[in-house]
Image: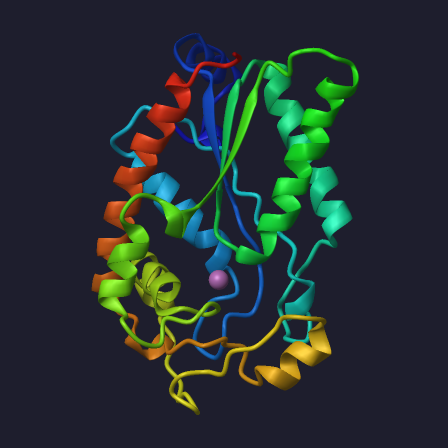
Amino acid sequence: MLLHLSTWAEVEQFLKRSRVIVVPIGSNEQHGPTGLLGTDWLCPEIIAREAEKTADILVAPTFNIGMAQHHLGFPGTISLRPSTFIAAIGDWTRSLVGHGFEKILFLNGHGGNVASIDAAFSEIYAEASFSRRRAGFALKLCNWWDLAGVNELAREQFPTGHGSHATPSEIAITQWAFPGAVKSAGYAPQIAPSGPIREALDFRARFPDGRIGSDPGQATPEKGRALVELAAQSLARELEAFGCEPMTL
Ligand code: NI
């Protein structure tokens, strides 16, 4: 069930059978010469929507702008600073908790979001801790590539040149979902350099075409299909297990 294509009455009915919701969360940022700007929010959205086709889960609208300040040297990138991002995650969460959702899983598609999402969770839990009360809800961060078996499949598909940004696995997923938006370009060097991530101008100087350690030329829609199918099955199991966890000890 997709929240944005449901009515409030349908969501009220859903809450009678489940208190679990998944929020795809990502970033709108450059992904090298052939990667779509939406790659990091499209991947978790594609996986969650695939899982929703066969499992009784509720998928929230995608939180599609994240912490991408280091990509701002490339046109099309849109970023929230960490403090804004943390505040916004808090309000999304409070909105859902207010309706009765007790287990909120953020399915993340951008490594640069992780520190801020963890900080947001701590801020939200702190509201209960400082007033010495039970929170009454549980938050979980899950990167799509960490879903059961997905990293292993990506390593098998791309033993070299996977890298950490504009990776062939994430680009393969968008190629499968949007075959009309597959891009091609030359890569020089074939496998991009690696290095530290700092601010936008330093990033562009270190990684001139935007990639980090990757060779996206290995991506194919067929490899993307295999990744999505596996990730969707693992997500459904992850949500089921999360829903069964006891709320408090
Ligand atoms: Ni990415």
Colour approach in the figure: rainbow
Q: Is residue 36 above or below residue 122?
A: below
Residue shown at 31%/64% (left/top)? Answer: 179
- Location of residue 47 (image quadrant): top left
Question: x, y (%) of residue 26?
Answer: 54, 51
| Number of on-image labels | 0
Residue shown at 56%/77% (left/top)? Answer: 195
Point out the image quarter for the N terminus: top left
Near-viewer residue (23 or 136)? 136
Question: x, y (%) of residue 84?
Answer: 76, 46
The answer to whether residue 89 shows anywhere in this view is no
Apparent side of residue 110 relative to residue 163 in the rendered image (left or right): right
Question: x, y (%) of residue 79?
Answer: 68, 58
Q: Is residue 165 above or below residue 18?
A: below
Question: x, y (%) of residue 177?
Answer: 32, 56
The answer to whether residue 87 shows anywhere in this view is yes
The residue at the far front in this view is 249
Near-viewer residue (114 or 52)? 114
The residue at the far bottom in this view is 188
Near-viewer residue (24 or 53)? 24
The residue at the far top in this view is 16
